Image: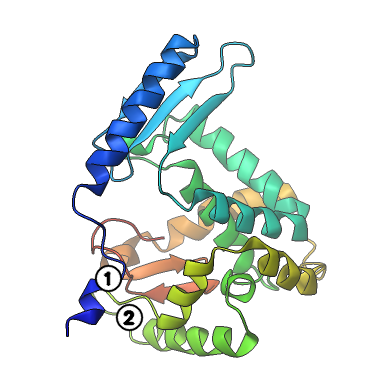
Amino acid sequence: RGGRNRRQQTPRGYKSRKVQLLSKVASELRYQKFADVNLIAHARVPLIKFRDPRTGVKCDVCVGNDGVYKSAVLGAMADLDSRYRDLVFLIKMWAKNFDCNDATAGSFNSYSLSLMSLFHLQTRSPPILPPAMRLTLQTDAAADADLAAENERAANLEPIRKFPVSKIRQQSDAMRDIAPVERRARRWRGCGANNGATLAELLVTFFTHFRAVEPLWRHGLVASAYAGRWTAGCSWAPGRYCL
C-alpha cells in the first residue's frame, strides 16, 4: 500500500545533511587556499563554487547528484560530431559575455546551455545528433515506446502540466551505467554527415530557432533533448524550466 508514493522518496533531512557536508568541504577548500569559495546552501541542488588560483579554472562541487553520468552522456554525444562540442563552447562564451550563465541569479547554468545546443543539433534537417533516449534507454523497442508517448504529448499541446516520468526511463536512469551508453553511441557514428551546416550557421540558427517559439513557452512547449523534438508537458514542477 502506498508503494508508488514511497518510490525513491528523498529521506527527511537529506538536503540539510548535504549542506553540512558541503560546509566542511568549503572550509577545507579555504584552508587549502582555493579562491572565491562560495557555499550556495539554498539552491535547489546545494553546491560550492570556487576557483583554482593557479589555473584560474572555476569549479562546482555538489553531493548526491548524477552529474557525472549526465556529463558522460553529453560526452558520448560530442564524440559523434565535433560541431556539438564547438557549439557548446561558443554558446557558453556568449552567455558569459552577456552575464546570463549563472543559475543562482536566475539565468542559465552550464548544463542547460549544453542541452539547448544538443536540442538544436537534434532538430536540424537532417538531424546532426540522435535523441538522447537512443543512447540512454536499454533497447530500441524501449526508445520507440517512449518516443511514441512523447509524440502523442506533442500532438496535444496544452497549458503546462506535470507528467510522470515513464517507468522505462526510471529504470534506465537508475542504472547510471555509461558503458552501455557508449556502446549504443557507436551505432550513431556519422549520423550527421548528411548535414553540411557550418559552425557559424549553427550558431546563428541557434538563436533564431529558440526566438521563433518564444510565444509558445507559456502554452506548454518543451524542448526535449531526451526525445530530440519539441513536445509538451514536463516531469518537473510547472513553471520552472522548459528544457
Q: Earlier in the sequence, mark 2 or mark 1?
A: 2
Q: How is the image coloured?
A: rainbow
* Three-letter amino acid code at the position of disc 2: Leu
Residues 109 and 184: in front is: 184
**Quarter residue 90 falls in:** top right
Residues 77 and 2: in front is: 2
Kindly tell me whether residue 78 is visible in this rendering: yes
Residue marked by disc 1:
219
State the quadrant of the C terminus: bottom left
For label 1, the SS is: helix
State the quadrant of the N terminus: bottom left
Q: Is residue 159 left or right of residue 84?
A: left
Marks 2 and 1, Cα distance to the nearest angstrom? Answer: 7 Å
* Three-letter amino acid code at the position of disc 1: His
Q: Which mark is residue 157?
A: 2
Crowding around mark 1 (Cα neighbors within 10 Å: few <14, some 14 to 19, many 20+) is some
- Are the residues at dot 2 and dot 1 in contact (C-beta closer than 8 Å)? yes
**Residue drawn at x 24%, y 63% as measured from the top left:** 237
